[in-house]
Image (tube, rainbow, N blue to C red):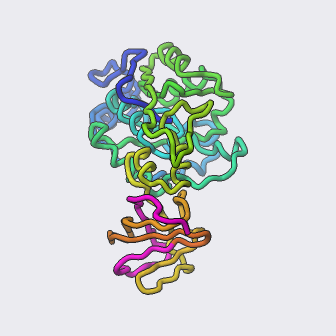
Amino acid sequence: MGFASLSLRPFAQPLCCRNSRCMCCRRTDSFSGRKMLKVLCSPMKITSFCYSQSAYMNSKEVVEDKLLIDCGPDQECVIGGIVALGKFEALHVGHRELAIQASKAGTPFLLSFIGMAEVLGWAHKAPIVANCDRKRVLASWAPLCGNMVPLEYHVNFSNVRYLSPRQFVERLSKELGVSGVVAGENYRFGYKAAGDSSDLAHLCEEYGLAAYIVRPVMDKLQTCNGVSFTNGKEKGQVSSTRVRHALASGNMEYVSQLLGRSHRLFMTNTRGHVVMGSRLSLPTLCLMNQQPKEGSYNDCTLYVDGFVGDCNVVIDGTHIHIETESWPPLDDNCLISVEFNGSVSRES
């Protein structure tokens, strides 16, 4: 879901790094050397990573006992930071707003869950944002986040599924050592979604964390090709569900409005590709994230191995066809991406 910028409401006094009495500096006393203190407590530009899973995921003990699965055994990576809570599937304008508000209070982090579909038995869906593209998207938010790139960390959903709201906040405080959290008004957490944003605020205050509850960023369009998305769960806010519907309709202008950027589709060049003149055809099995509706798209931008150029795209039931003036040499398994700047012009 998405969140608006004008409704940031602190429920507890934010902790800062102005002196050694603040939480993040207190928690660095056991670390060796002033360099670690500076890294954790000084304003800085943060470098993100591309949704990678570290070697620590191979440690059964860490996966079972630690909250984060990609932060190292000591989980010092988020100490003193401000954690935005959510699913962050689409990295849309509402998610961006959470990161912006987190950056106003401290060092911003996105804390999201992985493995929910497997645990809850949901049908598999292609990601909206290709895993290898998340770093680029988060980096594009830096100018709005105090020139800091929000870092993204992941929680294995199976490790927290049965935690009560209190237990979850306790782990944020005692295990991760964060100084505050940002969440939307509609945020729910804890086993069977027992806790809401009000519970989050009160629990954070109890555990000495700052809590910022943000109103939704609303979808100005509200309909896509005549289909309204407002239902019992959604009250008109920007959401990943709306992005998926807009992609499925081929309305790329609407997708861009929801994302705050053009949708970029990634694919891996395989031995199954066919080049005929200026057209490259790849099987849709090569796609790494959700494709738009089948049809013809003009005014697209092609990115491949440092090459950037204009292209037209046709998506059918089995292949994606990309036409450009001149193709650079293509290595097997190289990444190819297309950015959609206009809506579908006709259906295939």
Q: Which of 216/106 is in front?
A: 216
Residue range of the region highlighted in magenta in the rendering: 321-348
Magenta segment includes 298 = no
Q: Is residue 326 above or below residue 226?
A: below
Spot occupied by residue 81 in the image (x, y as percentages of width and height): 39, 31
In the displayed image of the protein, which residue is found farthest to the bottom?
Answer: 277
In the displayed image of the protein, which residue is found farthest to the front?
Answer: 226
Left or right side of 201 for 118: right
Magenta segment includes 327 = yes
Q: Is residue 48 visible?
A: no
Quadrant for the C terminus in the image: bottom right
Spot occupied by residue 109 in the image (x, y as percentages of width and height): 42, 37
Spot occupied by residue 77 in the image (x, y as percentages of width and height): 43, 38
Q: Which of 332/73 is in front?
A: 332
- What predominant SS class does the magenta segment belong to? loop
- Report the number of numbered marks: 0
> Which residue sits at x=56%, y=33%?
234
Spot occupied by residue 336 in the image (x, y as percentages of width and height): 44, 69
Q: Is residue 311 visible?
A: yes
In the displayed image of the protein, which residue is found farthest to the right?
Answer: 121
